[in-house]
Image (cartoon, rainbow, N blue to C red):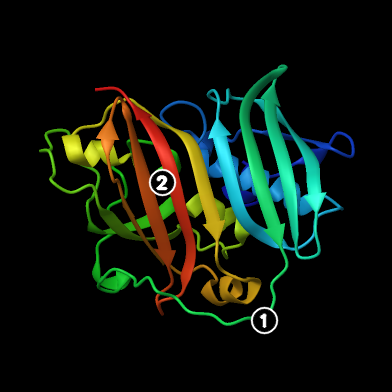
Amino acid sequence: MTGTHPFDDAVQLDAIDAEVWRGRTHPEWANMVGPFGGITTAVIVRAIETHPDRIGEPLALTVNFAAPVADGAFDVSLRVVRTNRTNQHWYVDLRQQGETKATATAVFATVRDSWADTEARPPSAPPPESIAPTGMGHVVRWADLYDMRFVEGPIPAADGRPSASSTTTLWARDRAQRPIDYPALAALSDVFYPRVFLRRGAVMPAGTISLTTYFLADRHQLDAVGGDYLLATAHAHRFSGGYFDQSAQLWTRDGVLMATTHQIVYFKG
């Protein structure tokens, strides 16, 4: 480790040329296979943020996980597909030793004054200070970097029973209270363990195939959160054919919807 935060170490990128950035996996972000998907999405956001042609802030990101990222160096290739007056479209290819491990499309956009409303409502939850931190029982290493306080749907114990509901709701923040930025929001949006664990009451092979994140918070709202908790809630709609979907929301204490996500996940069992 260096003297910096493990998150900043993990998203550190070096320019190879105008369109390619090189990064390296970080051991503290290890998942069941390869690195935590959330840190991969964070790296992609950071790569685009760093590009000199970037305009605006992240609005939407879809990452397709083609194969597990191996420990070691990787290259992130960026290409601007189109730049409009208020939004910019990107294509991203993450490669190792000539093989594509993930592809992504992203939209960055400038914020405009407009009418605003939030139809969704946050789930009911007691304040995080009233809930004991439990985490994920060291099932995956990356989870130790977060302070997790489950309101409902904690990861099942080794002798867990199947659940009729796939919903998990928890308060989560960086354990060192690193202030949240867009790459950190991308990572935190994937803080959930697979929904099939809860429904089946057991840990089993599973992995995200495609993850879409919508960034709804502006820079001022991010700054207002600082290193505080976000209330994260996720559920599945259907399990079938070895796949399930997941929809999730992230809220602030005062009811600001910061991000929503949707993903499709492979499972075996």
Asked whether 251 or 5 is in front, the reply is: 251
The answer to which of marks 2 and 1 sits earlier in the sequence is 1
Q: How many marks?
A: 2
Left or right of 211 on screen, residue 157: left
Asked if residue 65 shows in the view, the reply is yes
Please name the amino acid that badge 1 sits on: Asp
Classify mark 1: helix, strand or loop: loop
**Residue 174 in the image, given as x and y percentages of width and height:** 48, 58
Asked whether 221 or 12 is in front, the reply is: 221
**Residue 224 in the image, given as x and y percentages of width and height:** 56, 77
Label 2 vs label 1, nearer the camera: 1
Asked if residue 157 shows in the view, the reply is no
Counting other residues with Cα less than 10 Å from the Cα at mark 1, is it few (<14), some (14-19), or many (20 or more)? few
Q: Quadrant of residue 208?
A: top left
Left or right of 109 on screen, residue 127: left
Q: Which residue is mark 1?
A: 113
Q: Which residue is mark 2?
A: 144
Mark on residue 25? none
Q: Quadrant of the N terminus?
A: top right
Left or right of 15 on screen, residue 1: left
Asked whether 4 or 127 is in front, the reply is: 127
Left or right of 253 on screen, residue 269: left
Q: Quadrant of residue 14?
A: top right
**Residue 225 in the image, given as x and y percentages of width and height:** 52, 73
**Residue 68 in the image, given as x and y percentages of width and height:** 53, 24
Counting other residues with Cα less than 10 Å from the Cα at mark 2, is it few (<14), some (14-19), or many (20 or more)? some
Please name the amino acid that badge 2 sits on: Asp
Report how far apart the C-alphas of labels 2 and 1 lie in the structure. 39 Å
Q: Quadrant of the C terminus?
A: top left
Residue at 86% from the left image edge and 53% from the top image edge? 53
